[in-house]
Image (spheres, rainbow, N blue to C red):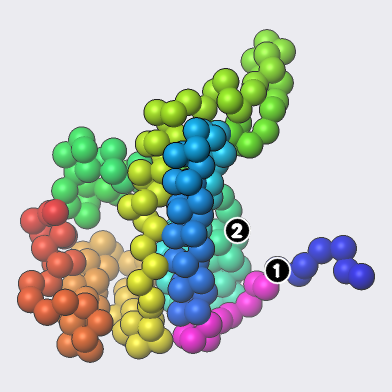
Amino acid sequence: MKKRLDSYKGKLTVDQIAEGINAAKKNAKRLFEDANLLLEAGRFPSAAALAILSIEEAGKVSILRELALAKTTGDVNEAWNHYRSHTKKNATWLLPQFAQQGARKLEDFKALFDESSDHPYILDQVKQIAFYTDCLGKAHWSLPQDVIDESLAKTLTQIASIFAKDKNVTKTEIDLWIKHIGPVWNQAPSWMNHALCNWYRAMQEAGLAPLGENEIEKFIKRGI
């Protein structure tokens, strides 16, 4: 018998990308629901840990979109490294805090993805102390139930609820993403913003987004 499963690290078809995104969305919702049940049962460390896992699972969606745009072997490898990195998947967990502090436009949230920021590592550490005992600081034993209280568990579960949306993504949506975002990926922000607006407009025309105002254009120019 094999001692471990081999992780796939190659290119994916558009169908496979859509399938992976939908699987991640579905599992993020399940993990959030389990976290909520544990929160209601007063099992705060476990609730917090599962909420963080839900946030990480939801974070796979943007990374799979990144993989859909990969052009070289290096791009593919980097995307898979991000996919399997806890800190790359949880980078947006402070988004609600940013909004509470006045962030409204796309530009206002840029710091969430700053490579020098430590907030992804903080959340990963919280997950570790929510699951495990450890010897920290000056030989102090950390017990999950002593560290993770109801307030923190509730906050993390509320954050997970924001990302735990399981609306299915279609092959057409990914095709449109590649068509509009692919040519300007990782290039000038102004080009990326224009391409995002065009992508959303194409989604509206294809019946995959609500008709009316272009919500991406509104978010970029005027904010939420």
Residue 84, numbered circle: 2
Q: Position of residue 129 (x, y in %)?
A: 60, 31
- Say which residue appears at 51% left-offset and 71% top-offset: 23
Front in this rendered view, residue 99 or 25: 25
**Residue at 22% of width from left, 66% of height from top?**
193
Report the quarter where the C terminus lies: bottom left
Q: Answer left or right for 9 relative to 24.
A: right
Q: Quadrant of the N terminus?
A: bottom right
- Label 1: element kind: loop
Three-letter code, disc 1 = Ser
SS for dot 2: loop
Q: Earlier in the sequence, mark 1 or mark 2?
A: 1
Q: Is residue 161 visible?
A: yes
Circles 1 and 2, Cβ within 8 Å, touching? The answer is yes
Residue type pointed to by label 2: Arg
- In the figure, residue 214 lies in which quadrant? bottom left
Residue drawn at (54%, 59%) of the image: 82
Residue 9 within the magenta-colored segment of the rendering: yes
Q: Which residue is mark 1?
A: 7
